[in-house]
Image: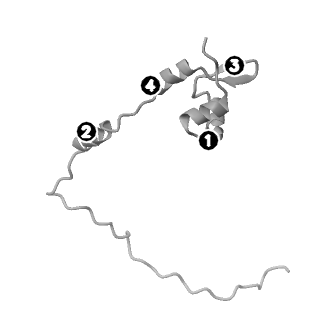
Amino acid sequence: MKPLIDKHELAELLRVEVSWVEKATTARTVPITWVGKHARFDLDDLEAWLKGNKEYPDAAPVLKMIAAARKPAPSPSRPPKAPRPPAGPIKPKPPAGPRRTEGRAA
């Protein structure tokens, strides 16, 4: 049996901060072996996990090309619509005058 490593050794191995390992442990995104209440990490499980988390950057340009091919091209025969004017005549607001206080009980 291979020895298990702790969060400090895993952070050193992955070249990340220990806080990242703690967050990944809390979120359960890395394979964890629990020894009582202590999180330990098996190197074989970590290797399999890393192989499953690979991204291939060559696929990104291909995906962009596929997405661009699916979008319909704007039709050149129809010009863009202009905003509509408001309906009816525009009336200016009446000027604000002094408030009436007559007829009111103070």
Tell me which numbered mark, 1 or 4, is placed earlier along the sequence.
1
Distance of mark 3 from mark 4, alpha carbons? 22 Å
Which residue occupies the extreme left position in the image? 77
Asked whether disc 2 touches disc 3, contact meaning CB atoms under 8 Å apart, the reply is no
Task: Tell me the residue that label 3 is attached to.
Answer: 34
Residue type at the position of mark 1? Glu
Which-is-in-front pick, marks 2 and 1?
1
Residue type at the position of mark 2? Ile
Which-is-in-front pick, marks 2 and 3?
3
On the rendered structure, is 106 left or right of 100? right
Residue type at the position of mark 4? Lys
- The one of 101 and 4 positioned closer to us in this rendering: 4
In the displayed structure, 102 sits above or below 18; it is below
Q: Residue at x 54, y 34 (%)?
A: 14
Tell me which numbered mark, 2 or 4, is placed earlier along the sequence.
4
Q: Which labelled disc corresponds to residue 51?
A: 4
Dot 2: element: helix
Task: Tell me the residue that label 2 is attached to.
Answer: 66
Dot 1: element: loop
Distance of mark 2 from mark 1, alpha carbons? 37 Å
Distance of mark 1 from mark 4, alpha carbons? 21 Å
Q: Position of residue 95 (x, y in %)?
A: 57, 87
Q: Position of residue 86 (x, y in %)?
A: 38, 70
Asked whether disc 2 touches disc 4, contact meaning CB atoms under 8 Å apart, the reply is no
In the displayed structure, 45 sits above or below 8; it is above
Q: Residue at x 54, y 19 (%)?
A: 45
Which-is-in-front pick, marks 3 and 1?
1
Residue type at the position of mark 3? Trp
